[in-house]
Each structure stands twice: as C-alpha cells, then as structure tokens.
Image: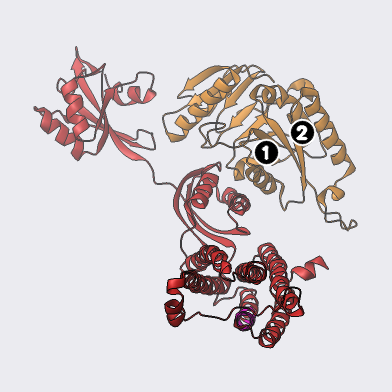
Chain colours: A red, B orange
Amino acid sequence: MMKRMRNPFVVMGIVLAMYFVKVSTKLGVGYSINSTMIQGDGWHNVSDIFEALMVIVMVWLAARPRSEEYPLGRKNAESLVSAAIGAMLIFMALKLAAESVLGLLAWIPALTSSIDAVNPFHRDTLIVGEPGSGLFWLALAVTGGSGLISLVVGCYQISSGKRGGHESLVADGNETLSDSVIEFVTCVGVLSEYFLHQPRLEYVFTLAVAVKLALTGRELFCKGFYTLLQRSLDSGAMTSIRDEVIATCGVVKLADLKAFRIGDVAIIIMKLHTRAPLSATRQMKKSLAVRIGRRLQKFGFAGADPYIRFDAPTPDWHRDAYAIASIDGEERISASIFSADRLRFCNVPDGNVTRASDTQTPSELPRIVALLARKKVRTVLVFGEGVESERAACRAAGIEYRSADFNDPRVYRCARRRR
Amino acid sequence: MDARRVVVPWKCNRSGDARLAYATDLADMLDAELETLPGASKEDVRLFDFESDDILVAPWQVSEDVTTLIPFDESGLLLRGLEHKVLIPLSGDWSGLYATREVMPLLRRLGFSIVFWHSTWRDLRVSSAEPRDHMLASAKVTEVQAQDIAREYGVGFESLVETAETIDGGLVFAACLHRCPLIVMARGRNTVLGSYVDDVLEGSHIPVLIMGREAEAY
C-alpha cells in the first residue's frame, strides 16, 4: 500500500485532484464574494494543473529504460521540469515583490492615489462582511484550508520524489509548498482586514515570501540547468570520489576524472593507473561503484554509475649522474663535479638502474650543468656535502644535487662496478 | 605467531623500494626488528634461517612454513587511510580457524578488528534469499569457533556470509568493499592440488598475509 502511494503517477494523481478542488472552490468563492485576490489565486492554480500534467509526462519519459539511442537514459527530462519550475518561481517571486513594494508604498497617504493609478497589480480588498458573518468564515476557510492542503501535499510530493529519485516531483513539491505559503499569507491578509482593518499588512509578509520563493526558484533552476549542461559535480563530491579511489589498494594514480549528474545518479568517467592484474581490476571496479555510490548518498545522489578505464602507469624514467674520479687507480665517487674525471649517466626506469655510460667532465661549471640538463638528469650524486656553488648552479637548472647514500645498493651498482 | 622480526628481501627497483617501505612501516607498527636482505634472490631467501615468529615481506612465498606477507605494490599498511581491519575467509575446513588463531596476537598489537567472510553455494532446496540460510552445518560451526577465538583475544569482529560467484573474486571484492588493507589466509591441509591462496594471489591487488604452517598444527 505504502509502495503504491509512493508511485509518482499516484502522487501526481493526488496533486491533480487537489488542484481541481482548489480551482473550483477558489473561483466559485472568489466570484461569489467579488474577491479578485481569490479569483487570481484560482486562475494561478489552473496553470498549476498544466504544470502537474507536464511533470507526469516527464516522469513517464524519464522512467523509460536505457537504449542504444539513449545510453544514459532520459532522466535529464526531469531536470528540464526542474529548471522550468525554478524559472517560474523566480518570476512569481519578482511579481510578488513588486506587488508588495507598490502595495506598501500605497500605504503612505500622500502616495496612495498616484501609486494606485500606475500599479498594474492593484486589486480589490476582500469583502469579508461583518465580523462573524458567513462570508468571513468562507474566505478564511478557502485561504487557510487551501494553504494547509498545499502544505501536506507538497511535503508528500517532496518525500516521494526524493525516495523515488524523481527530481521533477521534488521541484513540483517545492512549488506546491510555495503555493501554501502564499495561501497562508493571503489568509493573514483576511485576518488583518477583519481584526485590524489593515489588509495591507499582508504585503509585509508577502515580501518575505517573495525572498523565500526567489531562493527556492534559484536553487531549482540552477540544479536543473547544471544537470542539463552536464556541469561537474560540486567540489565536495569530486573530492569524495578522489579520496575513495586513492584509498583503494592497487591504484597508483587517478589519471582522469569527469563526473556529472543525470537525474539523481552521478555518472563518473575515470581513468585509473594500476599495476594490478585484470581479474583484480574487475573486483576493484565493482567495489568502487558501491563505495563511491555510498559516499555520494551524502550529497543527495541515489547512486553512482562509474565508467572506469584502467591503464598501466607511465614508467618513472629518469637519469641520475654520478661524479666519478680515479684515485690511485681505483674508481671513487668524487667530492664535487668539478673535480670528477667523468660523469656516469645512469638510466633509472622505475628506480631500477638498467644502463650506465661515462662522459668526460667538461672543464667549466656552466658547461657541466648544461650537459646534465641536456642529458635529462634528475639528480647528481657526489661524495659528502659537495660544493655550494655547484649545488646552486644545479638548483638553478632544476637538478637535484646531493650526497650519495652508501646504504643504497644502487650506488654500488652504478659507481663501484669497475675498479 | 608473534611477529618479532620482519624480514624483507630488497632489490633496487620500484617494487623493491615499495616492499622495503611496507616492511619498515609494519616493523614500526609492531615494534619488531627489521631484517633487510639487500639484493637477495628467491633462492637466497629460501636458504635464510627463519624463526617461527618471523614475517617475510616478499613478492612470493618461499616456504609454506614461513608466514609471508605479499604487499604487491603497496608501501604501507595504513598509508591509504583504510579501516583498521583485516579480512579472514572462513570455510568448512580448518584453514580459516588456523589463520584466525595464528594472527590474533598480531591483530591485538596492531589494534585491528576482523571481518570474517564466508561464501556459500546456494542450496536449491532452500527458498530464502538470505545467504546465511544456505550455509552448511560445518561452516556454521567454524564461524562460531572463529568468533569464539576473537572473543578470547578481545579482538572485535563482524561476520559476512555471501553467495559469491568465485571464492577468490568474491573475497577480493569483499575486502575492497569493506576497505580492508589486508587479507589473512592459510593453506588448507587437505588440499592436494592448487589453493585458494594461489588464486587470491593471482587476482588480488590487496596485500595478503599467508600464515605459515607449523608441523604440530598438522
């Protein structure tokens, strides 16, 4: 039963029924008591019926399965609704704000006649009749009751939309909630006219409602618009994905990451560098999908759909150079480059010395540094602390200059091989 | 198995450097002695005089008697910020219980907890979708015994039962899913050909600790 009540079509059916009741009541009461405000609200609800029909069509479209033509599905159709409702709420907020400002200005006696003359939103005040009369209670019941129904149905729509992952339902629910706030403010207008004989007090509340509407509208519009344009997920979600990937054993590097939203699912396209075997990458892929999905739930996503490519990391290929000097016929690592007979260039792919060749040391330091740079040397190794001028010259060329670590077997392999 | 010494053969290359870093990190965490064997080949390691409390950190297992940790390309147990827990697969036989009992002192020192993992075949006579309802009686007994061992040592645990497609794949998947930085296993004593340990080593990217056999345990 509960599951059926969460079905988006059932939800929208209830919403449509609500609007039909509201339209018939508001138009009936509005015309019978000659209230343009209630009539206007009734006509606004007529437009809400078309909006609800649009939501139903989009929910149906979005629920259609993936196909060859639509490999990622049609969930974005709901974002279209979200953006449209957002834009409509912003428009409504602007209208309400203008109406309120002009209404409040007209409160100033000196301005009343001139403002009323140019105010396009000018409306008659309610005719609520004598205190305790039937007309008063009717106006109160229509505005207050309508607000209450909108509040309940809006919450129901949002909750069902969030559970079912229907963005358009959530957006429409927000719109219904904003309707309820407007209806309550109208109700306040009725009460203020009855008790204070100041119907314009309603404008103060309406101004606050306009701000709230504008913010909700902006949020819905941006969400829908960003989804339609496949904007990257926000930085928090992206960092979360990166953290989860890097925390996976076997991952050397996250080489590429693109993530965007389709409906309530995050589409993640990434390339990982790993040395793990193919069978391991299969498990890595499966578990990452679940782990990232769990993480992204905190950011309002129903799940993640990762597309992961694996690649072998680029070997860390570089050269090291040893300053070599012959002392008493024995080969030694020299205390400086300048005092070395020759430079031994070692190819070091992935930390493994695979080749070493000697070149006679040029006579001047700038030429030595130029040779090191030309040979793509990353580190020059000397015995002991070395010479400060050489260190500075190497640093300027982007080359590390340091003492050879005799605990490192590479040093023996490179520099003590031939005696 | 108290892991008083961590032994690591070290060669000058990327994986050798990573392995040395892993062994150093492990020795620090366990407050154990670190024995490096620079340039040692598999044959050199095979001839090394291991003691029962040694952990060998190497890319291969040289003897089934030596507790061996194969780190793949990882350079530290907790460098990736994973959970403080290990995954131990349990089956209906003895190996899971043996691994559990042997690794307990180590886990207590590291402050790690355990994820007991068991995969069962779906029993067609049982209609339940819950994997636990498909477990064999012997596997249930093993699970209880393993949990008792954990309680005895005061090590926290959780138990997972799944119906994985393959043991090795399901095990690696579960370890990855539950963010375990280490899988602990032992070789079965009744296995005459092949081993789940070898299958896992073939298809894993998560470090695996293989508990060494002791003659009396058999």
Residue range corresponding to the magenta coloring: A37-53
Element marked by disc 2:
helix
Residue B95 numbered mark, or none:
2
Tag 1 residue? B197
Tell me: residue A24, above or below residue A161: below
**Split into 4 quadrants, where in the image is the N terminus of chain B?**
top right
- In percent of width and height, residue A381 lies at 27, 25
Residue A208 numbered mark, or none:
none
* Magenta segment, prevailing SS (helix, strand or loop): helix
Is tag 2's residue or tag 1's residue first in the polypeptide sequence?
Answer: 2
Tell me: residue A155, above or below residue A379: below
Q: CA distance from mark 2 to mark 1?
A: 11 Å
Q: Classify 10 Å Cα crowding around label 1: few (below 14), some (14-19), many (20 and above).
A: some
A252 relative to A283 in the view: left or right: left
B115 relative to A221 in the view: left or right: right
Amino acid at the residue labelled 1: Val
> Which chain does tag 2 point to?
B
Q: Are marks 2 and 1 on the same chain?
A: yes
Residue positioned most to the top: A328
Task: Between residue A342 and residue B176, name the one nearer to us.
Answer: B176
Task: Between residue A104 and residue B129, name the one nearer to us.
Answer: A104
Residue A117 shown in magenta: no
Amino acid at the residue labelled 2: Ser
Residue A42 position by quadrant: bottom right
A204 relative to A418 in the view: left or right: right
Residue A49 shown in magenta: yes
- In percent of width and height, residue A232 lies at 46, 59
- In percent of width and height, residue A124 lies at 57, 81
Q: Residue at x 65, y 26 (%)?
A: B67
A25 relative to B127 in the view: left or right: left
Task: Between residue A49 and residue A242, name the one nearer to us.
Answer: A49
